[in-house]
Amino acid sequence: MLKANKSRWFERLFFVYNQNLLKRRFHTFKVLGLEKLINRNNDLPTIIYCNHSSWWDGLAAFHISQKANLDFFVMMEEKQLQNLKLFCKLGAFSVVRENPRNAIESINYSVKLLNEDSNRTLWIFPQGEILPNDLRPINFFNGVSRIIEKVGICQIFCVAMRYEFLGEYKPEIFARIDNHQNFDNKESFISKDLTKKLSKNVTDNLEKLKIDLLQNDLEKFQNLI
């Protein structure tokens, strides 16, 4: 697998590049609930799980992480990361979900990263591939639940993202960050059941975001670009 090789100076440089890129390609990047990440418990490792509907998701996740001052890591498909190896310097590492041994290695690597430093954050897109926002049901791989179980004590956040044309020449990004949940090693759960619960959380969050857009209820959203 390809491991993360974070570079702070490259991260700062890429933030400037990424922000300018987002400004060129999108009219706005509006987020609801950013303060939930900013005010997270720094003594607990953080896992953020999100739907996966666009190639831009990783760059959007990086931008949110920078705005919330997160020590960001992200799991990416190895075939994508092979072509974007510079992303390893931003905290990306690879997984091959079709290969069980490689998938377990990536899960264990995720757990190691989070257990080494409680202030770290892992972004994961458990659908495993880019799929339309409104495709139902939303199905997750079990990797995210296994990571939660192995980390033992952590906080998790559900994020929903959509890309929409709303009367502007350029599209807009919308993200909705839901309330966090805490897990500890005293809890026992079945990974498959937790995976279904997490996929339902994302489905519900996406529906709430869709309603916000349909009703033009965007006053509380913060533009990040």
Image: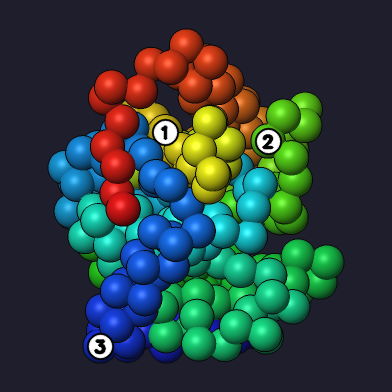
| Location of mark 1 (residue) | 176
Query: In the image, is residue 50 above or below residue 101?
Result: above
Residue 192: x and y, percent?
69, 38
Q: Quadrant of residue 65?
A: bottom left
Q: Secondary structure at mark 3?
A: helix
| C-alpha separation, residue under disc 1 versus residue under disc 3 | 29 Å
User: What is the x, y in percent for residue 1?
Assistant: 64, 84
Q: Quadrant of residue 182?
A: top left
Q: Secondary structure at mark 2?
A: loop
Q: Pick whichever of labels 1 and 3 is earlier in the sequence.
A: 3
Kindly indicate whether the residue at mark 2 contacts the one at mark 3 (C-beta within 8 angstroms): no
Q: Is residue 187 left or right of residue 68?
A: right
* Residue at the extreme front of the image, as rendered: 169
**What element does badge 1 sit on?**
strand
Compared across the picture, whether 216 is left or right of 140 comes to left
User: Quick one: label 3, few (<14), some, or many (20+) residues within 10 Å?
Assistant: few
Work out how far the residue at label 3 is from the one at label 2, CA to CA, in angstroms.
35 Å
* Amino acid at circle 2: Asn
**Picture coordinates of residue 4, whole percent (x, y):** 47, 82
Pick whichever of labels 3 and 2 is earlier in the sequence: 3
Going by the numbered disc 3, the residue's amino acid type is Trp
Q: Is residue 201 in view?
A: no
* Residue at image location 42% in from the left, 85% down from the top: 89
Rounded to the nearest angstrom, the CA distance separating label 1 from label 2 is: 14 Å
* Towards the viewer: 27 or 11: 27
Residue 21 seen anywhere in this rendered image of the structure: yes
Q: Is residue 20 above or below residue 189?
A: below
Going 29% across and 67% down the picture, which residue do you hit?
Answer: 71
Which residue is the site of mark 2? 133
Label 1 amino acid?
A: Arg
Residue at mark 3: 9
